[in-house]
């Protein structure tokens, strides 16, 4: 069995098309098909349902493609480890992030790239939590940062990073009181534009409303935080965003942030890795950066800007409650 056989098999499973898989692997389609057929003979199972075109993986193929991805991930990790021993950490770190945590993910990424200038980071953003979990389990991501719950723990290791607080973002004073706070019950009466249901932060919002005995049906739903900002800026809607979002998004004009209270709730942001694989040296180095340098309140400052003078994130960053391990470097 050769590694390229596994590469071809994984490519077909990913592309779901023989010609596209061959193109992605820079081989002819007959060569790719012959290599996969040889792999099937060696394993004594049929991996792919074949007709005139690709018809999907067999039941056995669905099981074994996970093993193929695992073997290839370990091989890539071995090659990267050897390269790191020679000249330092290099290669590509594949990082997934939920839509609401992209601004904070930039902080450990900046430190990581400063420490390891030969490394590159490929950020896959706006992924729902279910997709982050799937790609981690299938070795399509090295690390992910987002909102995870107990249902996501299987096969993954989660390390808490920090906690987020919810803020009602409004434009002007027509949709919300002039004070610096608003209750969840009051926020339920405001026209809302909210993150789409597949965004992890949305589940936290829905749970918070449920805790005060109400359900909201927003007129606008989107997986883009920039889109939420644009809708709020029209003055027709308010939105609920994490307070850390203000770190990178410009807050100008009549925009205000009101702390949501009664109850005042926080949600945990974690970094996730595959629990059973050693991981690449780049992934371990990134973990060291992320958990070894806790996000500090001053890192969420407005840089001299204010949100109507009513919400100061410098006072509201809460570190993760769970202790982090000292090092992830083998």
Image (cartoon, helix red, strand yellow):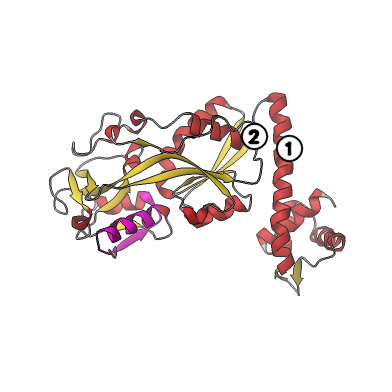
What is the tally of numbered marks visible in this picture? 2
Question: How far is mark 2 from mark 1, CA to CA?
Answer: 9 Å
Determine if residue 100 is in view.
Answer: yes
Q: Residue at x 69, y 61 (%)?
A: 13
Q: Which mark is residue 63?
A: none
Q: Which residue is mark 2?
A: 281
Q: Which residue is mark 1?
A: 78
Q: Please provide the residue range marked out in magenta.
A: 201-225
Determine if residue 11 is in view.
Answer: no
Residue 140's spot in the image, x, y percent? 62, 50
As drawn, 205 above or below 243: below
Quick check: marks 2 and 1 in contact, CB under 8 Å? no
Q: Residue at x 33, y 36 (%)?
A: 317
223 sits left or right of 48 in the view: left
Residue 72's spot in the image, x, y percent? 73, 47
Q: Sort mark 2 into few (<14), some (14-19) or many (20+) by Cα contacts within 10 Å.
A: many
Residue 137's spot in the image, x, y percent? 61, 52
Residue 244's spot in the image, x, y percent? 35, 40
Q: Residue at x 31, y 31 (%)?
A: 301
């Amino acid at each position: 069995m050769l590694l390229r056989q596994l590469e071809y098999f994984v490519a077909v499973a990913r592309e779901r098309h023989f010609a596209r898989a061959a193109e992605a692997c820079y081989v002819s389609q007959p060569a790719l098909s012959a290599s996969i057929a040889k792999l099937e003979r060696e394993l004594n199972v049929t991996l792919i349902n074949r007709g005139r075109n690709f018809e999907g993986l067999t039941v056995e193929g669905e099981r074994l493609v996970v093993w193929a991805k695992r073997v290839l991930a370990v091989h890539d990790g071995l090659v990267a480890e050897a390269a790191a021993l020679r000249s330092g950490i290099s290669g590509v770190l594949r990082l997934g992030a939920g839509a609401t945590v992209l601004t904070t993910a930039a902080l450990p990424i900046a430190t990581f790239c400063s420490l390891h200038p030969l490394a590159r980071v490929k950020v896959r953003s706006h992924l729902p939590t279910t997709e982050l979990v799937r790609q981690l389990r299938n070795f399509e991501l090295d690390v992910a940062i987002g909102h995870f719950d107990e249902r996501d723990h299987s096969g993954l290791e989660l390390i808490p990073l920090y906690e987020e607080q919810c803020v009602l973002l409004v434009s002007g004073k027509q949709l919300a009181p002039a004070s610096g706070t608003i209750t969840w019950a009051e926020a339920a009466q405001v026209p809302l534009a909210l993150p789409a249901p597949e965004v992890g932060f949305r589940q936290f919002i829905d749970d918070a409303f449920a805790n005060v005995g109400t359900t909201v049906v927003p007129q606008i739903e989107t997986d883009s935080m920039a889109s939420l900002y644009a809708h709020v800026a029209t003055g027709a809607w308010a939105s609920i965003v994490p307070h850390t979002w203000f770190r990178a998004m410009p807050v100008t004009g009549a925009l205000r942030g009101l702390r949501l209270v009664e109850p005042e709730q926080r949600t945990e942001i974690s970094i996730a890795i595959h629990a059973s694989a050693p991981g690449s040296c780049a992934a371990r180095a990134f973990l060291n950066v992320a958990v070894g340098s806790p996000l500090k309140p001053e890192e969420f400052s407005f840089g001299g800007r204010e949100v109507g003078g009513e919400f100061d994130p410098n006072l509201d960053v809460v570190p993760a409650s769970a202790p982090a391990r000292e090092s992830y470097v083998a």
